[in-house]
Image (tube, rainbow, N blue to C red):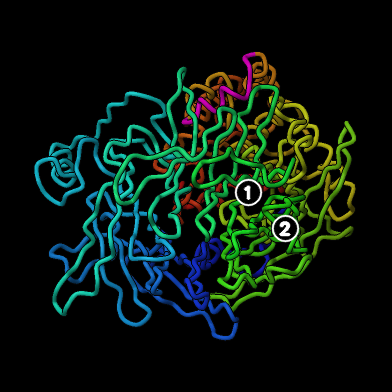
Amino acid sequence: MAEPAPAPGPFADLDAFAALPRLAGLALSPDGTRLVTTVATLTADATRWRGSLWEVDPAGQRPARRLTRGAAAEAAPAFTPDGTLLFTSTRPDPQAAAQPGEDAPAALWALPPAGEARVVGTRPGGIANPLTARTGDLVVVTSSTLPGSDASADGPASDAVRRKARAEKKVSAILHSGYPVRYWDADLGPGQPRYLAAALPADPPAGERALAAWSDLTPAPGRRYDEASAVLTPDGAELLTTETLPRPRGEQHVRIVAIPTAGGEPRVVADEPGREFGALAVSPDGRWVAALAESVSTPTTPPTLRLVVVPLDASAAPRDVVDGWDAWGGAPQWGPGSDELFLAVDDSGAAPVFRVEVASGRVTRLTADAGAYGSLQVSPDGEHVYAVRSAVDAPPAVVRLDARAAGQEPVALPAPAPAPPLPGTLTEVRATADDGSPLRAWLALPRDAGADDPAPLLLWVHGGPLGSWNAWSWRWNPWLAVARGYAVLLPDPALSTGYGPRFLARGWGAWGQAPYTDLMTITDAALARDDLDASRTAAMGGSFGGYVANWIAGHTDRFRAIVTHASLWALEQFGPTTDAAHYWSREMTAEMVAANDPAAHVERITTPMLLVHGDKDYRVPIGEALRLWWELNRHWAGDPADMPHRFLCFPDENHWVLTPQHAILWYETVFAFLATHVHGVPFQAPDLLR
């Protein structure tokens, strides 16, 4: 059977898809009149995406306008109290002696309401995550700094001198004294992320250059701070951040601390033995810190994620704002009156926006649609909430919500680029699990699928495992498959978030049980439709979804092909080698590992498998793919030339495979492999891989 021709449009052309603008993040000016987002577009040589800053009109009257046009990527927008826009970039500084390139450390730039952007801060290790207060001219940034270095610009102990010495001697070695040593795709060290503070310099006279004089708030970190959870108090007197402390036996513990920006020792704001904190937000009146508190899991107890508030003066312990409400996916934002919080939380295949009254715990769902919202910004008058909205069938876009209205539809604001037309439609599939639990999935369908021409089905299993198919994905985009005639099933099995603690607990420590049977049940329900072809099916998954793909391969031959990306294969091997072994050790006992190990079932695998892995993946190390590939070869008794399995390895990619041309090759290889086994087309590797 011939493979169908792709439907017209950008989803049929991988180069055109890669060139689509990609919007992310949101910053609101203090007076509420300006919204800024980041839009990534493809560079001229199509080898990377480069971000630029765009302004979106909160009133929805003016078209979006581009603010920056640097030769390098711009990121991390943040407004100062006077309306100046800060951002980071490696673009060349016209007043600097040397002109940095694409790989130069990022500097801090300031773009006034009127005029050109200028550099206001540099560091040898680069600058990231600028933070500003509601009042004053203080800015706090994060900068990677070598151990033992001071924050001065020169001298034998300076960061610049020490970095130069390592570079000249071509030294990349790191001496570790504790755990962890890696994170996702980065080695931890030798640089340490430090918080630096400075008063923003005034605009200098013509021909002069004024740079921030940094003071080091964390000169001897010793512990790990998470800049993603950092926030300044309204007056800028303290920096609130999470601090990770090492514990015996490789464990670690996360608490909230306050660091004085004028100098001094950190103080503890919240510390609970059984919970860890993140996603901090300080109330406008400076009295409260809102956060998400995740309980420490055990092999029999999955984590909970609660919205909490704690007095900034640490006079009381953190209080759950809403009893029993899991806030998976949330990031709280205060209303201007310091009496309510707004956050988007996973809920039944969506991530709607909720308003929460802090005193009573009353929760109001503001959005009625199936969108997934993020980057919430509350207007200074408390009347509106701005957000980035996406959905399985809608790429990210900036929208406006009424902060008081329940069950509303969002108002779309003028976008930097129009949304591309989809090659199909989205619907839902529902079923009931063996234990009576309700199951649901999204189903993306080609427009011409019908009883006379049913579409082959691809089962896509999400990662996490604590997650949900509820948002747009540029990396795992079902519409590329739909454009090629496939229907794509996106289920939320046991362990998925947004369905309550019992649903999550059904798969805790038992990955090969309820998650697997849920997926088979929802697949059967989908294939009962007359517009799907039950004789032509395949399964795919990445990360935890790759684990499930491997488990499926060893437990059923119902699928014609299986694609397993960044997958867990040998659980006993994976646990001690992942970058977060301390977290893994909390979840499964040795008995649970043995009972849920895909590697124990390799002899039963008959379905052709495509393995994909990046060598820079530290969350699921490359050893998982190498071992799976060897065992597939070892158990293939036929002619090696006839072995149906394939292994696509990216030596310099991470968990996701992110660079444009590699992402294109990923899709080309996946679709070629599926065409062979679903449609019977002879396998033909992409041109660059032949």
Instruction: Sort mark 1 into few (<14), some (14-19) or many (20+) by Cα contacts within 10 Å.
Output: many
- Can residue 606 be seen here? The reply is no
- Can residue 307 be seen here? The reply is yes
* Residue displayed at 59% across by 70% down: 398
- Dot 1: element: loop
Residue of label 1: 329
Locate residue 119: give its quadrant.
bottom left
The magenta segment is 579-590
Residue of label 2: 485
The furthest residue to the bottom:
61
Locate residue 449: give its quadrant.
bottom right
- Dot 2: element: loop
Q: Is residue 176 left or right of residue 468?
A: left
Q: CA distance from mark 1 to mark 2?
A: 32 Å
Most common SS among magenta residues: helix
The furthest residue to the top:
591
Locate residue 203: give its quadrant.
bottom left
Q: Amino acid at mark 2?
A: Gly
The furthest residue to the front:
315
* Residue displayed at 13% across by 77% down: 207
Q: Residue 97: x and y, percent?
A: 12, 65
Is 365 rendered above or below residue 311?
A: below
